[in-house]
Amino acid sequence: MRKSIFVAVPLAVLALAAPAAAHSSKHATTYKAKVVAVQAHAAKAGKTGVRGDAKLVDGSRGDKVQLHVKGLTPGESYAWSVRSASGDADPCAGDAVGAFDYGTLVARRHGHTAARSHSKDFAAEDGTAYAVVVTAADGTDVACGEFKSKADRRAEKAKPKVEHHSRGTHKDDGAGDDEQGDDDTVDDASDA
């Protein structure tokens, strides 16, 4: 009887763990963005220090977006939104995503501000680019950051490495052979 209890307990634990393991395969997708000043606003305001970061989590049970911005004008109010655009269009100039509720941002004493929003209705679509945009009270876009997935960020990091390696010279690429050197050899042969 004791042997059957010791065998039944581990089997019961495995039976309970199997559905949990099957459910854990549905991970959330995290997108990150580096928020930078929009060039038109930076030139008008005479400052280029607007910067920050944002994170968008597209999960099966819930979605959230977080925003942290520095370098804004202290005391000023700003609006913010997540925007989307299909294809090659600029997501910073796209349409606002209605799944999130956006509050007003007020820059604190040193020009820093933060915001977050939650949603259960957002689902990132394939072929659509997303960005977070901070807009001044007069309606001009102050800062923008395009959301990139982890795979996109890795691809961007790898791209400069490939370009760097392709600039180097190879031993058999003909480096050092010039027409002038060949002409000198021919001239020397005709002089003799």
Image: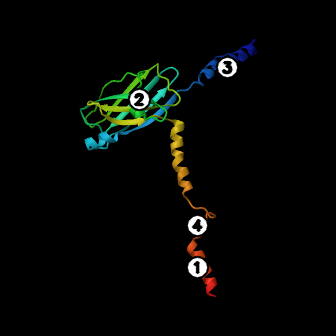
**Image quadrant in which you'd find residue 69:** top left
From the image, tell me which residue sits under label 1. Answer: 184
Give whichever of discs 3 and 2 has the lower sequence position: 3
Left or right placement of residue 168 versus residue 82 in this view:
right
The amino acid marked with disc number 1 is Asp
Which residue is at the front of the view, 166 or 50?
Answer: 166
What is the x, y in percent for residue 157?
Answer: 51, 45
From the image, tell me which residue sits under label 3. Answer: 14
Could you tell me if the residues under marks 1 and 3 are in contact, i.e. CB atoms within 8 Å? Answer: no
Mark identifier at residue 83: 2
Q: Nearer the viewer, mark 1 or mark 3?
A: 1
Mark identifier at residue 102: none
**Image quadrant in which you'd find residue 75:** top left
Could you tell me if the residues under marks 3 and 2 are in contact, i.e. CB atoms within 8 Å? Answer: no
The amino acid marked with disc number 3 is Leu
The amino acid marked with disc number 4 is Ala
Picture mark count? 4
Relative to 191, residue 111 above or below: above
Give whichever of discs 4 and 1 has the lower sequence position: 4
From the image, tell me which residue sits under label 4. Answer: 175
Give whichever of discs 1 and 3 has the lower sequence position: 3
